[in-house]
Image: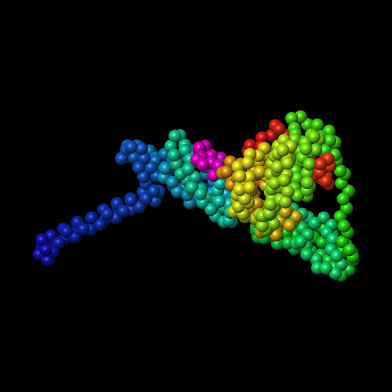
Amino acid sequence: MPEGNDKPADKKIKNERIIMKKIFCTIIFVIACTLVSCGSVGTTGGSSESTSVATITTSTASITSTSTSSTAAETSTSTTKAPDTTKNNKSSEIPSGVELETYDEIEASSYTTVADLFIDTNAELESADKLIDTDELGEKRVKVKFSYEGENYEQEISYRVVDTTEPVILNSGWEPYVKKGTAFDLDSIVGYADNFDRAPKLTYEGEVDTNTVGDYPITATVTDSSGNSVSWDLTVLVLNEIPMPEDNNTRVSFQDFIEANPYENVRYGIDVSAWQTNVDYEKVKNQGCDFVIMRMGYYYGEIKLDDYYYQNMEKAEAAGLDIGVYIYTTVNTEEGAREQARWMLEILDGKELDFPVVFDWEEFGHFQEYGMNIRDLNNIFDAFYDELEKNGYKAMLYSSKNFLNNFWENRNERAVWLAHFVDETDYNGEFAIWQASAYGRMDGISGDVDMNIQFMSESLDK
């Protein structure tokens, strides 16, 4: 019926009904808002009459689960432990019994896995060994899948990447010489690196007058982009002439080297390059040498084959020695390392070796010149290893005790060739070969040769 034809009494009744309806709707709306403010609502189990509400309380970073049921008069609430790093993470599925306690801060450029992110958890993590992003500073989030009591869940975890590690001094300069009248450049004398910053800044306090002969004490400082710094003292010597280095090292015969290292279950060998020129491997073999690791090539901006590589390979094999190869490199990119591995693979052409292919990077004295941080070079070795492994070979890391302790992560525990020129090494890490002397002498080789001990109990297949 049209509204204009209503009687006055009918209009009054209708208006009262409209008012009552509005009041009723307002009450329903208030109740609904109250329920919604408790959290998001979703069904649980198989009943259409039961609902569960789950929220994350940002002030306490705890996961709170509240269950309500139309068949129950009581409401139960339980809270599970969780860290500040779960703030703003949302899940309507996680049971109240799950514990997800994580670290709030993670160090930059660190090899941190999903499992490492957790201080404590009673859940079974999926992809626990997967690395999380630590390459850039700031807030990060990662979705973590896990199982609990036979059910699968996913939670977004937040963390902050920070840089709190001071740079590392790789070459302190000792007592550097500067010729009178020449410019003083401390950066060309010392070596340093940082875990995160690829270009930390070197400064020094003090004065070096290269126009006047004398001793000039200074304090050098390396500071990274996050403000972490390390300082040390050194004395710069300004001289009329730079003295020639003296060689006071004692030479040791190969036979004396064997007698001085009477370890059980070991073999003795050498490593060679073009510096040893024409090696008589028959004579070398007759003196008790069991193996030789030879330089295949070297890289300073471009890769070159060792002048004696093919000759060394042919004659060492003919003498019945076990054989390995290495590359000396200054590569500073992962792709560059893969290219060098492929270059070596092409030259090997499927040849079987008795040792893993050796990665030899030694330019730590001026490391800052290569534009890398510490993790970069570790990743470069991993890339080199990966490229060889894809083609049926293993790789080995060569380095000194100092840099094995302070630089190389070797997180995958690859085989190690230790360089430590002492009578008895105190290196605590694992190593399969020990290069114990650089001043060996033996028949069949003109000049010095490196002497090595292989520990047969240590696996090379890593």
Where residue 38 sits: x, y (%)? 40, 48
Tell whether position 121 is magenta. yes
Q: Residue at x 75, y 35 (%)?
A: 290
Where residue 381 sits: x, y (%)? 64, 48
Tell whether position 359 is magenta. no
Which is more toward the observer, 381 or 78?
381
Where residue 276 sits: x, y (%)? 78, 47
Which is more toward the observer, 142 or 9?
142
Establish if 20 lies above or below 74.
below
Location of residue 373 (image quadrant): bottom right
Q: Which residues are magenta?
A: 120-130
Q: Residue at x 85, y 40 (%)?
A: 252
Where residue 175 sits: x, y (%)? 84, 57
Q: Residue at x 27, y 54 (%)?
A: 25
Visible residue check, residue 116: no
Quadrant holding the N terminus: bottom left
Left or right of 420, for residue 5: left
Q: Residue at x 75, y 49 (%)?
A: 274
Quadrant holding the C terminus: top right
Visible residue check, residue 180: yes
Location of residue 186 (image quadrant): bottom right
Location of residue 280 (image quadrant): top right
